[in-house]
């Protein structure tokens, strides 16, 4: 999707009765149809038609390929590189994109994006731009999920850049997501945490990050003991200290997000999250300290699904999640000697009336579980707790002794 597609492509949830068999595209000649295959033992198919249903395309998803046929002359639109279609992997869903302006057809598995494309074809604009309806029969074997207004046209940039810093080269190369093209919810979150003063180490506590490191590494300190106690959080029968992180919340839950919307997350060396989604919410993530590795997945599955992308985010870089894109990921601090700290911000979009207040994740037994976003401690209390530990630590006491000796020597 291009920059502008992101803001205009929010999912339109589809609700059908058994009698309904067609869906109108939001704009003729373009859009993305997202659907599930109801019976994995059968193929699924649909048609994309003009107003009087005399022109159009027939689309068949089979286990070995995607078959697209011109219904006027039964001419197949073959992608010679397409050698996959339906999958038996649990949790999979599919999409088909029609793009009259760029004369492109795409099909894919999982999140609708260039990374998940399995079929593509260049086709005639005048033919595509008259198509308005997706038609299904009783035997289509399809569960419709969403219609997106805009087609898949380009790779999706993961990094956000402030509009004041954006260059013409950035737009031309599609390397950054301009903050102005985020959804209203995401813009609110971004504007709250993007400022120069939104930082971990402050004048009143310049050693905050170092003090957190000390608390993590020192038995008896709050971070060390809390992480140890959380070793069974995601897998009660299989304790795993490395599959833990700390959630420090800022503010209150206002009923507009899964849990409290602003969460500082602390990732000790080699610690990671389970593979999980974000309840269909929008999110903004900024790295406050260190760096974090993010693996992106096409869909949440109890089977072994490989990530389609991995990306390293560094201090002060900001990325994003929408209800349709970047929803399923796994975070890991791959460093062996220093902690990563991020700020995660969540909010449901204004047209989301479901508010699913959980993150689904895959546990150690490859089963899907629910995690209700919680808080290990409020930020203000956490900062004071860490400050007290730091002031009482041998490290700060040694620093004070050295400083006093240095001052006495010169005074």
Image (tube, rainbow, N blue to C red):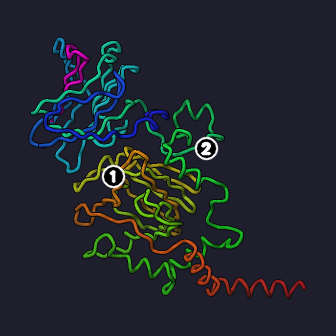
Q: Which mark is residue 354?
A: 1
Q: Who is closer to the viewer here, 169 or 57? A: 57
Indicate the position of residue 270 as horizontal and vertical percent values: 43, 67
Residue 327: x, y in percent? 37, 50
Look at the picture and state if 394 lies above or below 211. Answer: below
Q: Quadrant of the N terminus?
A: top left
Q: Is residue 307 magenta?
A: no
Q: CA distance from mark 2 to mark 1?
A: 31 Å
Q: Residue placed at 19% from the left, 43% from the top?
A: 87
Residue 258 x/y as whole percent: 40, 59
Q: Nearer the viewer, mark 2 or mark 1?
A: 1
Residue under circle 2?
A: 162
Q: Quadrant of the C terminus?
A: bottom right
Residue drawn at (38%, 80%) of the image: 229
Determine whether, in the image, residue 328 is placed left or right of residue 83: right
Marks 2 and 1, the one that precedes in the sequence: 2
Instruction: Out of 358 and 325, give the one closest to the viewer.
Output: 358
Looking at the image, which residue is at 30% across and 39% down?
146
Q: Is residue 36 above or below residue 251?
A: above
Please report the bounds of the magenta region as a residue range: 46-62
């Amino acid at each position: 999707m291009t920059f502008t597609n992101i803001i205009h492509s929010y999912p339109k949830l589809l609700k059908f009765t058994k009698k309904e068999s067609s869906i109108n595209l939001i704009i003729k000649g373009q859009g993305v149809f997202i659907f599930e295959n109801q019976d994995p033992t059968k193929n699924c198919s649909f048609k994309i038609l003009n107003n009087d249903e005399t022109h159009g395309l027939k689309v068949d998803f089979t286990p070995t390929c995607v078959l697209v046929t011109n219904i006027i002359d039964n001419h197949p639109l073959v992608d010679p590189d397409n050698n996959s279609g339906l999958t038996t992997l649990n949790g999979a869903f599919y999409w088909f994109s029609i793009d009259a302006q760029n004369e492109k057809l795409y099909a894919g598995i999982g999140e609708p994006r260039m990374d998940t494309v399995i079929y593509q074809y260049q086709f005639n604009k005048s033919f595509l731009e008259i198509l308005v309806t997706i038609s299904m029969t009783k035997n289509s074997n399809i569960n419709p999920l969403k219609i997106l207004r805009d087609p898949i046209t380009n790779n999706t940039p993961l990094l956000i850049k402030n509009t004041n810093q954006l260059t013409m080269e950035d737009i031309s190369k599609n390397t950054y997501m301009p903050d102005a093209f985020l959804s209203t919810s995401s813009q609110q979150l971004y504007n709250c945490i993007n400022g120069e003063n939104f930082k971990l180490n402050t004048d009143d506590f310049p050693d905050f990050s170092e003090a957190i490191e000390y608390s993590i590494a020192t038995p008896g300190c709050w971070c060390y003991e809390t992480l140890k106690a959380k070793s069974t959080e995601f897998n009660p029968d299989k304790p795993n200290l490395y599959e833990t992180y700390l959630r420090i919340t800022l503010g209150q839950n206002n009923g507009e997000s899964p849990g409290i919307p602003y969460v500082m997350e602390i990732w000790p060396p080699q610690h990671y999250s389970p593979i999980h989604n974000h309840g269909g919410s929008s999110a903004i993530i900024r790295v406050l300290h260190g760096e974090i590795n993010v693996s992106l997945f096409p869909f949440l599955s109890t089977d072994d699904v490989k990530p389609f992308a991995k990306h390293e985010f560094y201090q002060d870089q900001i990325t994003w999640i929408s209800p349709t894109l970047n929803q399923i990921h796994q975070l890991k601090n791959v460093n062996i000697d220093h902690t990563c700290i991020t700020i995660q911000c969540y909010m449901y979009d204004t047209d989301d009336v479901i508010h699913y207040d959980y993150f689904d994740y895959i546990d150690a037994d490859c089963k899907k579980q629910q995690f209700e976003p919680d808080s290990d401690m409020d930020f203000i209390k956490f900062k004071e707790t860490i400050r007290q530990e730091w002031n009482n630590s041998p490290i700060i006491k040694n620093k004070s002794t050295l400083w006093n000796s240095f001052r006495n020597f010169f005074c």
